Image: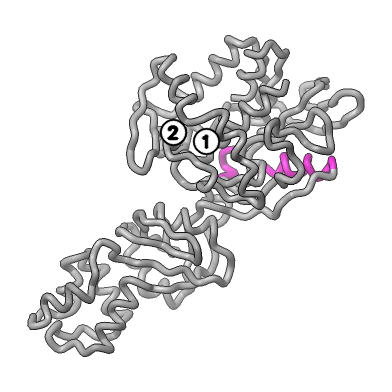
Amino acid sequence: MCAQFSGNNGQKTLLLDHSNKLAEKIRISGGGRCNFTNLNTAPECYISNNKHFMKSALSRYTPYHFTELLDKYNIAYHEKTLGQLFCNEKSQAIIDLLYNLCIMNHVTIKLNTQILKVEKDNQFIIYTNNGEYYADKLVIATGGLSIPQTGATPFGYNLAKQFDIDIVQTNPALVPLTLDPKDLNYFSHLSGISFDSITELPNISFKENSLFTHRGLSGPAILQISSYWSSGTPISINMMPTINIVEKIQEQKKSNKKLSTFLGQFTSDRMANSLVNILKFDTNISQLNNNQIKQINNLIHEYKFIPSGTEGYKKAEVTKGGVSTNELNSKTMMSNKVEGLYFIGEVVDVTGWLGGYNFQWAWASAYAASQNF
């Protein structure tokens, strides 16, 4: 994205990539359909040590700029839920578009190019397995550590450190959470079952689906809250956010249904049985006492668990942390210490929510940098 903007501005532009394929992360995103932006993009949908840093870039290149680009080249797309836009066809349509824009704008692309060393004198000198390159401006758009099978490496962070640029500690984000054996014992057999939920930490909550896995919990609501979670902190989960379970019990207070049968009206039988196993009673609804009703309410609407960890960078959709925003100009994305050195996209300490926000940050930060060339 940045390269085609640069070429369009009349700059002689070279794109170097150590991979043998362009944009693998685009290809696999959105189940292969590329959730390329979100109509609800706003600064509050991003995590950063500086909550204002992303405002300038996001305001200058919006989701509508990207959809205008797709419209211009007849790439069809649709909205799913919560403002998420997906390609009608495969993600390759986005990759092909960006590649073709690079070619149209006379960008030179070299794949299978390992960056061996970078030095800065009057110019940047980039030493590679395919020779040396010289540039007045160098843009680092290498992403984070997430999904290493797509070619992710710590290259961007290492180069920042080389130039004495601060890094905010990195962690997996938008990542499935694992449970300790006690909790897993109740839920592991539910692997594959999804359910409506609200996940909550102090000051932030997400209402979307959650999914049981053989190691813990995943699904959109869990991935979202994982970006805000820190080790040892309990997460609260409402497993039936569309009903009030106490009211439902009161409505059927004279019923002789077993609790497991009653709960099965609102969720799967397997999940209902698991909830009863946690409660350690399966009393008739008519025989429930106030303490038991309170226990049911707390379990279903305020279940608290402390994840044992995450499934790590291999399963994380993005990397939280990265090049400190204190080190960059928010309007140009250029380093405050090194003239002509730019950092854009996921390598920067700006992490979006699930649902196209991180792609929009990539497009917007690419545009911001290119306008300074």
Identified at 16% across, 74% down, the residue is 262
Q: In which quarter of the image is the N terminus?
A: top right
Disc 2 marks a residue whose amino acid type is: Cys
Percent position of residue 82, x then y: 36, 43
Say which residue label 2 marks: 34
Farthest residue in the right direction? 121
Percent position of residue 279, x then y: 30, 82
**Cα–Cα span, label 1 and label 2:** 9 Å
Asked if residue 368 lies left or right of residue 75, the reply is right
Q: Is residue 293 above or below residue 363?
A: below
- Marker disc for residue 359: 1
For label 1, the crowd category at 10 Å Cα-Cα, with few meaning under 14, some 14 to 19 and many 20 or more, is: many
Q: Which of 202 and 4 is in front in this view?
A: 202
Q: Quadrant of residue 132?
A: top right
Colour option used: one colour
Callout 1 secondary element: helix
Q: In which quarter of the image is residue 298?
A: bottom left
Identified at 17% across, 73% down, the residue is 248
Please indicate, yes or no, whether residue 317 appears anywhere in the rendered image: no
Q: Which of 24 and 325 is in front in this view?
A: 325
Disc 1 marks a residue whose amino acid type is: Phe
Q: Is residue 77 magenta?
A: no
* Part of the protein shown in magenta: 147-163
Callout 2 secondary element: loop
Q: Is the magenta stretch mostly helix, strand or loop?
A: helix
Q: Is residue 158 magenta?
A: yes
Q: In this view, does 146 lie above or below 76?
A: below
Identified at 15% across, 78% down, the residue is 250
Asked if residue 213 lies left or right of residue 269, the reply is right
